Image (tube, grey):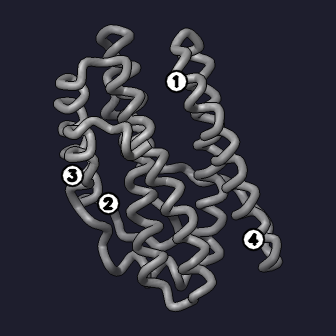
Amino acid sequence: MHNSLSEHARNILGLQLPTDPRWVNLAEIQLNEILTDYAWCEQKAALTCISLIQKNHDKHLLVQELMPIVTEEWGHFRQVLAELYKRGLSLGKPRKDIYVNKLIAFQKKDGGPDERFLDSMLIMALIEARSCERFKRLSEGMEDEYMRKFYRRFMESEAGHYTLFITMAEHYIDKKIVRKRWAQWLQYEKELMTSEEVRGDRIH
């Protein structure tokens, strides 16, 4: 998927603010909590992709591309759940995702179908991009070698996911419009991350 990206898409994928280095240390201390949170994140990602297929059933390429993502995200949910069970833990209840809810607040509620579709692609790209960045932090900063490798696998997968959503946006919407709106999303997310409390019990 990386090779199919247009040049400007490759240039605009970068997040504007890296994760606070303290987050990795906090996450390692609260490993059980972050595993539970991550399991629910993957489950929600699978359901969101199913919802996008339902809402955009007329977009043939999008449907084709999202079907394997649903399978992959659900597979990740099962892998993380297995890791929880191996540790003698239960899944636990899902939490309110403040980060995602604040991103949703930035989505355009009015405008035409194309604008709403574009924002739905870009919010998914942003969530996947931040997840990828955080898995990279965990895969490089955790002391536990097993968990470093565990998150490395997820990091590699998420990288393909966020580029997919950018590619789908570019396929259906003018690339200049995509680039302009993506820059707005990146700036908004930077401000959000600046104001967010550093917590180690959640992926976002």
Q: Secondary structure at mark 1?
A: helix
Q: Which mark is residue 196?
A: 2
> Label 2 amino acid?
Glu
Disc nearest the viewer among 4 and 2: 4
In the rendered structure, are the residues bearing label 3 and label 4 in contact, judged by CB atoms less than 8 Å apart?
no
Label 4: which residue?
A: 84
Q: Residues within 10 Å of mark 2 (few under 14, many from 20)?
A: few
- Residue at mark 2 to residue at mark 1: CA–CA distance: 32 Å
> Label 4 amino acid?
Leu
Identify the mark nearer the N-term, 2 or 1: 1
- Residue 195 percent location from the top left of the image: 25, 58
Identify the mark nearer the N-term, 3 or 4: 4
Q: Which mark is residue 62?
A: 1
- Residue at mark 3 to residue at mark 1: CA–CA distance: 30 Å
- Residue at mark 3 to residue at mark 2: CA–CA distance: 9 Å
Q: Quadrant of the N terminus?
A: top left
Q: Residue at x 49, y 63 (%)?
A: 155
Identify the mark nearer the N-term, 4 or 2: 4
Q: Residue at x 39, y 46 (%)?
A: 2
Q: Quadrant of the C terminus?
A: bottom left
Q: Which mark is residue 191?
A: 3
Disc nearest the viewer among 4 and 1: 1
Q: Secondary structure at mark 2?
A: loop
Identify the mark nearer the N-term, 3 or 1: 1
